[in-house]
Image (spheres, rainbow, N blue to C red):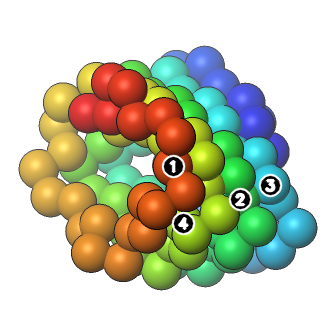
Amino acid sequence: MGYIFYGCKILEKLNLTNFNTSNVTNMNHMFDGCSLIKELNLINFDTFNVIDMSGMFNECFSLTKINISHFHTHNVKNMDSMFFKCSSLKKLDLLNFNTFNVKGMNKYF
């Protein structure tokens, strides 16, 4: 699923409640450049097998609300630029993030 919505500059809303992500290992740059999206509810995302989340929300300038509280990140190795340039994001719940295996976190925010 890497780059699936990459550069969708005019995309304003996404309904991802029925996305089956249980076998996904790569979510890098998934929403990169989606500069008009204000909210993302990813509570149903199964990230148990994901190893790359680099640039996942990079340059989501308008993003103000995101629900990633159920993300499982224990297998993730790369989080470089994950929230880079998310300048409108005021609150982010990372309490459940396990970054033990992460090797890259450059330009995280």
In this rendered view, identify the residue nearer to me: 33 or 79.
79
Q: Quadrant of residue 84?
A: top left
Q: Decide which of tag 3 and tag 2 comes sooner along the chain.
A: 3
Q: Decide which of tag 1 and tag 3 comes sooner along the chain.
A: 3
Residue occupied by mark 1? 102
Q: Residue 82's x, y, as percent? A: 44, 38
- The Cα–Cα distance between marks 4 and 1, rounded to whole angstroms, is 9 Å
Residue shown at 71% from the left, 59% from the top: 50
Q: Residue 100's x, y, as percent? A: 46, 62
- The Cα–Cα distance between marks 2 and 1, rounded to whole angstroms, is 12 Å
Residue occupied by mark 4? 73
Tell me if residue 104 can be seen. Answer: yes
| Left-right relation of 82 to 78 | left
Discs 3, 2 touching: Cβ within 8 Å: yes
Q: Give the answer, above or below, for where 27 lies relative to 80.
A: below
Q: Decide which of tag 4 and tag 3 comes sooner along the chain.
A: 3
User: For numbered disc 4, what is the local secondary structure?
Assistant: loop
Residue occupied by mark 3? 25
- The Cα–Cα distance between marks 1 and 3, rounded to whole angstroms, is 14 Å
Discs 4, 2 touching: Cβ within 8 Å: yes
Discs 4, 1 touching: Cβ within 8 Å: yes
Judge the density around disc 3: few (<14), some (14-19), many (≥20) Cα neighbours within 10 Å.
Answer: some
Q: What amino acid type is highlighted by mark number 4?
A: Thr
- Name the front one of labels 4 and 1: 1
User: For numbered disc 3, what is the local secondary structure?
Assistant: loop
Residue shown at 29% from the left, 66% from the top: 94
User: For numbered disc 2, what is the local secondary structure?
Assistant: loop
Residue occupied by mark 2? 50
Q: What amino acid type is highlighted by mark number 3?
A: Thr
Q: Residue 11's x, y, as percent? A: 55, 33
| Left-right relation of 84 to 76 | left
